Image: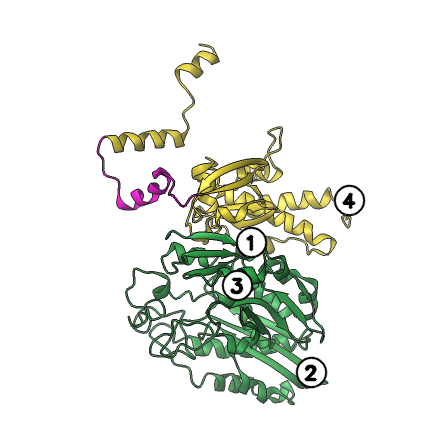
Chain colours: A green, B yellow
Amino acid sequence: MNDFSYVRAADIDGALRLAAQPGAAFIAGGTNLVDLIKGGVAEPRVLVDITRITALATVQESAPGGVRIGALAPNSDLALHPLIVARYPLLSQALLSGASAQLRNMATVGGNVLQRTRCYYFYDTGFERCNKRRPGSGCGAREGYNRMHAILGGSEHCIAVNPSDMCVALAALDAVVEVRSLRGIRRIPMTEFHRLPGDTPQRDTNLGAGELITAVELPPSRYARHSHYLKLRDRASYAFALVSVAVGLAFDGEHIAAAGVALGGVAPKPWRLAALEAELRGRRLADLDLGALAAAAMTDAETFAHNGFKPELARRAIVRALGVAAGREAA
Amino acid sequence: MDSDERDQTNPPLSRRSFLQAAAGAAAAGGAVLPQALQADTSAAIDPPAASSVSVSLEVNGLRHELRIEPRVTLLDALREQLQLTGTKKGCDRGQCGACTVLVNGRRINSCLSLAIMHQGDHITTVEGLARADGGLHPLQQAFLDQDAFQCGYCTPGQLCSAVGLLEEQRRLGAGAPALTDASIAESMSGNLCRCGAYPHIVAAIREVARSDVRSDVRGDGP
């Protein structure tokens, strides 16, 4: 690990001022950042510890019937929080499918939103080529081992996937990320928080320099009764998704009144399926050819030498997750 | 020879102190350690850098004042500074769980946590699980009874993780779903065992979880 200094912030404004130092990085759970520092991928000069800012740790009802989740809420506590279990079981399920019990105890919501890709070429400095880690050096994954890599939203410069399960559920639930800086507060929809790589893959998100995630806001729950998070991976637990699907459905009688559907493990950001959702709205599930709709969602998929299985896996996963969410089949 | 004489002439030699002495002898003899091993041991041998800071850690009920660099992980502070070598370093990257300890009753990976961030926390390592009178923690006894290990390297992490699991179950209270073999395996997935003792580890945890329920006054009964 590179040497760095450490400072503990007492409140949000203090944290923002401390983060204005060159080479400063916020640290909370540390599960990703400490790992990246050990690997030489991240080399902060100052760590600003925000874990003692108690105002950032609360989970509470917000005025319009939603829930406001403080950025420091641990993944484990949030998954079991009564408000989340009752109103957003999709989020609870996604959280519990990620990482291990130990890591969920450490990892925070804000850190989960900001966790970086697990692309081997990014994570291992032994590889020379990675445009995300060393802009302009090339992409080792496109011509290399790319089993876990993106089939949607990638570019010639980067096909790394976002590894978060939580963010896939948050995208389907229309969550909004609240960020603070010395200039003020702004709110970014989860679906717009992460960036596609284009020709600047070194920037994962639209978070600006010196900005701190302070909360994630959930709108009033529509999908509490009909939702499902399906995660497919190489082992039964404690592995990143090859493909995951978050589905929330709201019914008006037999007709679908609203739908939120997002994919994980296939793109550089949580991949919301807006066209599929539009096809579902106002229809009865029994009248739809779900296989064809799911296949249409994969039309733009671009596969590589080792991930050619992903479009079909994703197509089947979408059909199954819709069926489970609707109560048509067992999980 | 009585026991006092034996202690004086043949002091107890642990595996660890033997290895340390052997490594010292090798270095004195000019033997060249492999590059990786040199890098691994240098952190412990080098004098503290100028950027070291004072940190107070409470481990197993005892307070320790340390001088460490901010980059020192909780795992390295426990092992290298406090000589609490029961907590193991496996992958050192949060993937194996050998370094699991309890912080304020919650299980975490000590390899991915900076020691300096734990001022004021109550840290429990495998050395702190036994009762004050030396009696084994029920999970330690169950691991023995169920033969829940082979080489033993992952065992301290498995034990601390299992203690954390049962504590999580207690916190959930009356509404907690009963632990099944499948749910125990899922909840313990952060602890790898390369000897493959998993069925016995699950059996040991199941045994203690059931006795917890039986001894619980608010248990639902038969």
Assign a secondary structure to mark 4: loop
Residue A69 disc label: none
Assign a secondary structure to mark 2: strand
Q: Based on the picture, tell me whether residue B42 belongs to the magenta stretch.
A: yes
Cα distance, mark 4 to mark 1? 27 Å
Assign a secondary structure to mark 3: helix
Please tell me if label 1 and label 2 are on a single chain: no
Please identify, in this view, whether the residue under mark 1 or under mark 2 is nearer the observer: 2
Three-letter amino acid code at the position of disc 2: Phe
Which quarter of the image is occupied by the C terminus of chain A?
bottom right
Residue A159 sits in quarter: bottom left
Three-letter amino acid code at the position of disc 1: Ala
Q: Residue at x 33, y 29 (%)?
A: B21
Q: Which residue is mark 4?
A: B217
Q: Which residue is mark 2?
A: A251
Chain of the residue where label 4 is placed in the rendered structure: B
Three-letter amino acid code at the position of disc 3: Leu
Q: Which residue is mark 3?
A: A16
Cα distance, mark 4 to mark 3? 49 Å
Chain of the residue where label 3 is placed in the rendered structure: A
Q: Earlier in the sequence, mark 4 or mark 1?
A: 1
